[in-house]
Image (tube, rainbow, N blue to C red):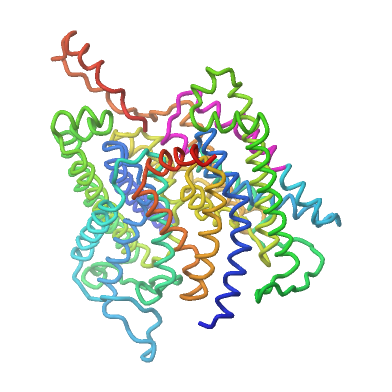
């Protein structure tokens, strides 16, 4: 395999890993707990900024030749910035969750989150001293690059391995949550909130837990992405990016970790990478515009024909329900609409 | 901060409020009567603005462009509902799914405009405006025209809702569609006509929005969406008079905030008002304002 191909394939694999991690986090919030988080991308962004700032070192003032301003720069050794990114993602999710997780109708909840996403972008752009405003952060040093003495292509594969390790850890986390009694309770909250509440489940606490865990995972995905591409700016996390992840989850199969992985492979990676191979045509920006049109059409087509995705969530059956139980269950209020 | 800058900001606020009122009344009628949160509303505004751009570029007058924009917005909204939204609702797509549908439509429309017209700045061809001093505030003739258009549109909406059968049927459908149908109102037709009317307001708002700016792009309308939603939510969804009031409040506060603090925070005012209202009175704003409205009407 030629070096160019190796570069290309390793890069795609890293993007795939990041997208899979991000989709698992959103699936935990939306697919499992039913939270319509249209601000998901800001938690990825928070993680990315955290990891970048903690790797870049203290900001150099412009008088000494520095070209970017930010708060809290530090030189932390390798895995720490990624862990810190997870913590910051989770902390931000806790703050947003306390404000935004109420019992709102889901279209209102989506609207609140959408606005939160827009406010976050506006703050990041206008508070230039926070994370260098519209230009964003650049030249983030690659992790471990000074310790291991590898050729550029060797380093690429090292990073693929690293992403894979994080993927496995995150999968373990989401698998433990979704397959445990906790996951069952979260699905109960999603499907019939009044019933879960009547059985004594702390509905708000559970939703909050899923929201914060999703935030942690989003932060980690952002950290890996920024350590790889070494730059991050407000243009990388517009609210429409959240829509791409939602589309991936719908296409793959909401609520199913494996399905969501397939969705991440199909939507952000296969569809958006495949367009690299069509020859450039038209004015600049035309292909980008067509990509967005394709993502939109994909979401519509799947919602129409396969609303449960290519690998639907497993229907869970519980054999203990007797005819009498079912009659009693039928008396409960209907499932709240999503 | 002198009194004159403050007064100038209030003047700008009145112009912004006029645009917001046209857009907000359309949005609140649409959402209130049809119960579909149409997040593509801003992009339909942009598309109507592009129609107006084509009309003025063909050498026709800007008044004709306004009519063309409103007609396009109306036709597009009716077709969008007939061929996308209603089929999805009948197919069983619910609240969350409908949001995904409307965001998908918004992305498709916005990027289709980008693909057709390219990433350039556009402006309507209009006669050069002169400036007019009114009560210490300076307006251009274009801005005065925008205010007049908004006032005329609001008056028409008022007459339509208060004195026509259609208006009555619309208000009934917004309050309780089930009951309205049982009373013999053809709610399907009312909903179709609501899309036509609110679409016309949306198109009109798109054209007046770009009359007020020096240049517009494919994202101009969608950037205006959140203030519009804020206006509708502040006034109570489905309450046109509430939206008019909301437009005044948000239009003037945002322009004054821009003058007092910094222009970057113009939109943040609308964002913050929207989030506070949604969180503090999630369902309350609808029901409470609605009941109070019943008494007042």
| Image spot of residue A180 (x, y percent) | 14, 34
Q: Is residue B101 above or below residue A67?
A: above
Magenta-highlighted residues:
B72-100
- Tell me: residue B82, above or below residue A25: above
Mostly what secondary structure, the magenta segment? helix
Q: Residue at x 54, y 68 (%)?
A: B255
Does B51 appear in magenta?
no
Q: Name the residue rendered at 17%, 18% in the picture.
A: A318
In the displayed structure, does residue B61 sit left or right of residue A12?
right
Number of numbered discs? 0
Which residue is outermost to the bottom? A63
Instruction: Report the residue at 49% width, 38% height from top.
Output: B295
Q: Quadrant of the C terminus of chain B?
A: top right
Q: Is residue A211 visible?
A: yes
Q: Position of residue A302 (x, y in %)?
A: 46, 31
A133 vs B126, left or right, is left
């Amino acid at each position: 395999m030629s070096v160019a191909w190796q570069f290309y394939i390793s890069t795609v694999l890293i993007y795939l890993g990041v997208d899979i991690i991000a989709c698992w986090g959103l699936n935990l919030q939306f697919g499992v707990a039913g939270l319509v988080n249209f601000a998901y991308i800001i938690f990825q962004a928070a993680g990315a900024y955290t990891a970048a700032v903690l790797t870049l070192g203290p900001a150099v003032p412009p008088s000494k030749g520095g070209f970017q301003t930010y708060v809290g720069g530090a030189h932390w050794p390798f895995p720490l910035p990624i862990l810190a990114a997870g913590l910051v993602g989770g902390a931000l999710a806790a703050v947003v969750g306390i404000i935004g997780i109420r019992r709102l109708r889901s279209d209102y909840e989506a609207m609140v989150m959408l606005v939160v996403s827009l406010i976050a972008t506006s703050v990041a752009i206008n508070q230039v001293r926070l994370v260098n405003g519209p230009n964003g952060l650049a030249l983030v040093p690659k992790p471990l690059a000074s310790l291991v003495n590898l050729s550029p292509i060797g380093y690429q594969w090292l990073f693929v391995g690293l992403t894979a390790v994080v993927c496995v850890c995150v999968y373990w986390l989401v698998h433990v949550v979704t397959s445990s009694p906790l996951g069952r309770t979260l699905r109960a909250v999603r499907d019939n909130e009044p019933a879960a509440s009547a059985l004594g489940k702390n509905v708000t606490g559970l939703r909050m837990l899923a929201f914060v865990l999703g935030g942690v995972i989003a932060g980690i995905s952002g950290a890996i992405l920024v350590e790889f591409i070494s730059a991050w700016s407000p243009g990388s996390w517009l609210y429409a990016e959240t829509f791409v992840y939602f589309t991936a989850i719908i296409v793959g199969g909401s609520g199913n970790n494996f399905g969501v992985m397939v969705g991440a492979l199909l939507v952000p990676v296969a569809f958006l990478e495949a367009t690299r191979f069509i020859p450039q045509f038209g004015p600049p920006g035309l292909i980008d515009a067509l990509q967005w049109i394709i993502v939109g059409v994909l979401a519509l087509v799947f919602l129409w024909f396969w609303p449960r995705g290519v690998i639907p969530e497993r229907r869970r059956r519980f054999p203990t329900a007797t005819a009498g139980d079912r009659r009693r269950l039928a008396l409960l209020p209907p499932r709240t609409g999503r | 901060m002198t009194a004159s800058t403050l007064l100038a900001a209030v003047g700008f606020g009145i112009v912004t409020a006029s645009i917001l009122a046209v857009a907000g009344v359309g949005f609140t009628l649409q959402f209130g009567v049809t119960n579909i949160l149409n997040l593509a509303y801003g992009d339909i505004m942009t598309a109507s603005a592009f129609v107006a751009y084509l009309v003025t570029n063909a050498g026709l007058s800007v008044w004709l462009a306004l009519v063309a924009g409103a007609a396009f917005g109306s036709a597009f909204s009716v077709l969008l509902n007939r061929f996308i939204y209603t089929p999805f609702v009948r197919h069983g797509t619910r609240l969350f799914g409908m949001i995904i549908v409307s965001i998908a439509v918004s992305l498709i429309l916005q990027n289709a405009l980008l693909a057709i017209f390219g990433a350039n700045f556009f402006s309507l061809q209009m006669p050069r405006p002169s400036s007019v001093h009114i009560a210490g505030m300076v307006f251009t003739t274009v801005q005065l025209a925008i205010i007049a258009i908004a006032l005329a549109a609001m008056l028409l909406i008022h007459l339509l809702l208060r004195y026509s059968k259609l208006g009555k049927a619309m208000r009934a459908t917004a309050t309780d569609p089930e009951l309205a149908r049982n009373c013999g109102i053809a709610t399907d037709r009312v909903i179709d006509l609501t899309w036509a009317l609110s679409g016309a307001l949306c198109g009109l708002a798109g054209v007046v929005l770009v009359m007020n700016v020096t240049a517009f792009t494919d994202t101009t309308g969608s950037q205006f969406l959140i203030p519009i939603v804020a206006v509708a939510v502040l006034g109570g969804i489905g309450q046109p008079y509430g939206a008019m009031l909301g437009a005044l409040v948000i239009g003037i506060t945002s322009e004054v905030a821009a003058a007092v603090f910094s222009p970057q925070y113009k939109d943040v005012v609308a964002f913050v008002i929207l989030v506070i209202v949604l969180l503090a009175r999630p369902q309350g704003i609808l029901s409470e304002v609605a009941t109070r409205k019943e008494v007042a009407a």
